[in-house]
Image (tube, rainbow, N blue to C red):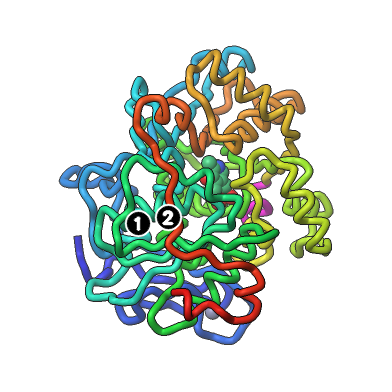
Amino acid sequence: MDTQASHYRLTCLHCGREYQDSATGFLLSCPEDHEPALLRAHYSQSHFEVSHEDSGIFRFWKWLPVRRTFPNVPGPVVFQSEYLGQRLGLENLFIVFSGYWPEKSAFMETCSFKELEAWPVCARIPAGENRTLVVSSAGNTAKAFLNVCSLHKIPCLVVVPEVGLPFLKMSRPKAPHVKLLVLQGNVDYLDAIRLGQTISANEAYFPEGGAKNVARRDGMGLVLLSFVEAVGKLPLHYFQAVGSGTGGIANWEMSLRLLQDGRFGTKTMQLHLSQNIPFTPMIDAWEQRSRLLLAMNAVKQRKRLQRINAHVLSNRQPPYSIVGGVYDALIDSGGHMYAISNAEAKRAGAMFLKEEGCDLDPAAEVAVASLEQAVAMGRIGTQDLILLNITGGGYQRREREQQLRCLEPDIVLSLEEFQQGQIWEKL
Ligand SMILES: *Cc1c(COP(=O)(O)O)cnc(C)c1O
Ligand SMILES: [Zn+2]
């Protein structure tokens, strides 16, 4: 492991300029003045290689933009679906499960694939960084960072909207260097993002960066790396429920690296991304093949997102239009999107619990329902190799087995206080 971060460089997907992460610290976007574009990590190791000296998810560090590794971090598990595959007539349906499911050896503490981003993001932070990391979240990302930063003495401020607070149940108390800020009022994830941006502009803080952080994306891309390590081939189809779409972008980018490697297949992996009706901003744009999200007033959008069960899918400003974002990933992969109602998701989740034996995050229920829809539409061949990304599950199980406690916020800020600039006296 090289702490200088010299096993990768960053390339701007718009102008092609290259950057060395070691010189810049924690680069989130191209410094050139042009349209918004993602950076992408390019690794000096062009073949997919698992490091057998390392354990847990950091066995994949050669394709992670990190300066350090953490031992024994549990990752997703991969298995062929018995019941669901049979029911849908799919002979090669594989599930990549991130969550808590002891029978399958899945032991992710906070039960979602957001842990796959939290660990690499923390491992990317340069040694000697003394500013505080700022993370905004609708729920699962908050849990993942509260946990990782508590375990490893990383100063962190987590910003969540009030509606996310009841979901922040943890098995251990957070550490004193990790602060939880709750934004009160009629607010959602986007308000928490804006507050996070305001705070991280202060010199004592720095932003995690969301989809712009290459460590977050390549961390989520561990879903595909785990699949290919287990199955030996690239899947033809990738199914996931999306709020920001970062996981979709991330696994598409990983599929490009694996295609370049050449040993795992030559066919493009098709993205099948789903959202929860009635909050479907990316689908609405995609159906018109529009690179821009369609205009909708904020009040209407808020009303819609309050009606979805899968509240982690409630991002009003997803990285859809940005160069290298969801739109480009869908175009390049010949992808599809699916709109799933609360009732369809619930039915799919109940079936999964009964037949496969694990409770799912409502977002993962959306993904299962989208697979059913794709099959019904005749988009999938019975022999096709399929990756179903079950992004979270086992919450109920974990709650039965562990003492989970709701977290108390360190700071409570109202939307009015935020708008009037009364942030700094509270921090
Ligand atoms: C965040 C989240 C998603 C959506 O992921 P994105 O790729 O960021 O849109 C899906 N499922 C669960 C459980 C999540 O926590
Ligand atoms: Zn650029």
Marker count (numbered): 2
Looking at the rendered structure, the secondary structure element under dot 1 is: helix
In which quarter of the view is residue 102 placed? top left
> Residues at badges 2 and 1 in contact (C-beta under 8 Å)?
yes
Residue under pointer 2: 218
**Viewer-side residue, 3 vs 73:** 73
Residue 291 location in percent, x, y? 74, 62
Residue located 43% across and 77% down the image: 18
Going from N to C along the chain, the mark reached first, 2 or 1, is: 1
Judged by its main secondary structure, the magenta piece is helix
Residue under pointer 1: 120
What's the mark number on residue 163? none
Magenta residues, start to end: 328-334
Residue located 23% across and 42% down the image: 72
Q: Seen in the image, is 414 located left or right of residue 140?
A: right
Looking at the rendered structure, the secondary structure element under dot 2 is: helix
Can residue 36 be found in the magenta stretch? no
As measured in the structure, the alpha-carbon distance from the residue carrying label 2 to the one carrying label 1 is: 8 Å
Q: In the displayed structure, would residue 46 be above or below residue 167?
A: below
Quadrant of the frame with the C terminus: bottom left
Query: What amino acid does circle 2 point to?
Result: Asp
Q: Seen in the image, is 414 located left or right of residue 61?
A: right
Query: What amino acid does circle 1 point to?
Result: Pro
In which quarter of the view is residue 158 placed? bottom left
